[in-house]
Image (cartoon, rainbow, N blue to C red):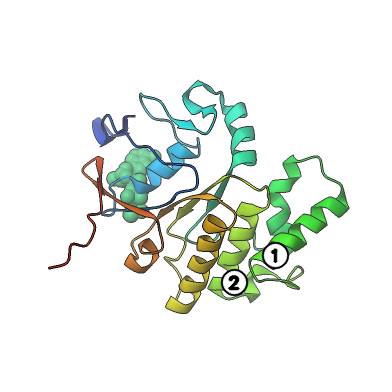
Amino acid sequence: MSKSFKVGTDTLPIFTNLTLGIQKGEFLALMGPSGSGKSTLLNILAGIDKPDGGTVRVGDANLDQMGENAKTQWRAHHVGIIFQFYNLMPMLNVADNVGLPLLLKPLSRKQRKDRIDRILELVGLTGRQTQLPSTMSGGQQQRVGIARALVTDPAVLLCDEPTGDLDRASADEVLRILRFLNRDLNKTIIMVTHDPEAAAQASRVLHLNKGSFVEQAEDVPA
Ligand SMILES: Nc1ncnc2c1ncn2[C@@H]1O[C@H](COP(=O)(O)OP(=O)(O)OP(=O)(O)O)[C@@H](O)[C@H]1O
């Protein structure tokens, strides 16, 4: 896959003939300097951004052969996205934020409520349904963000610096949930992070370096 951006009259290459395979059920951490293309890669995997050339397959979906509407539908069913700054709707309460992705699904009010309640329990936010995000801590807001990403039961979770705005204790709680989702619910997780402690939770760490990935070397005892 190749990707560049046009900046004025210049072309800024981000990836040139990048080949990357991610296994179902992996917990992959993507690291690398600012501007190296980590978020761009997540956007390409989500079908939000398009490569200039090459092929991007996620499960059975061949993203480069799908139109925009098909990709939007596909994303709504198969991919959950978790953001650094949560991206919650401030005027909606917790239950309505978490339920947003379900608006595209033909569910009854009761089915919707049951699913929201179950997911909130999973992220440790039972009883918070009517609370507004602005009255919650950063860690709690991120757990609402995780619940929203999970509510459609996607196979893949894309996380863009999910602990980047959190203190250590809240970050550790978010990482504990991500680890649980990976190990116990078999979610494939791709997490961009600058935090070595977050990366240490992953089953594989890749460092983006000048448009290609370098696998983190195993620690070799001296
Ligand atoms: N829509 C765009 N138009 C032009 N340039 C862009 C666009 N999106 C990203 N870029 C450029 O592409 C490069 C990669 O950006 P990207 O956000 O993927 O990096 P990153 O590794 O996620 O960085 P960070 O760690 O700072 O979030 C940067 O130089 C950025 O300025």
Q: Is residue 219 left or right of residue 20?
A: left
The residue tagged 2 is 140
The residue under the point 70% across, 60% down is 119
Give the vertical position of 187 relative to 95 (above or below): above
Tell me the SS state at disc 1.
Answer: helix
Residue at figure coordinates x 50%, y 28% from the top left: 63
Amino acid type shown at disc 1: Leu
- 180, 190: nearer the viewer: 180
The x, y position of residue 158, in whole percent, is 49, 49
Q: Cβ(mark 1) to ligand 1 < 8 Å?
A: no
Q: Is residue 88 visible?
A: no
Q: Nearer the viewer, mark 2 or mark 1?
A: 1
The residue sitting at 61% across, 34% down in the picture is 74
Q: Quadrant of the C terminus?
A: bottom left
Amino acid tagged 2: Gln
Would residue 219 be seen by someone viewing this image from the given angle? yes
Which image quarter holds the N terminus?
A: top left
**Label 1 sits on residue:** 120
Mark 2 neighbour density, 10 Å: few (under 14) some (14–19) many (20 or more) = many
Q: Residue furthest front?
A: 221
| Secondary element type, mark 2 | helix
Q: Position of residue 151 (x, y in %)?
A: 68, 52
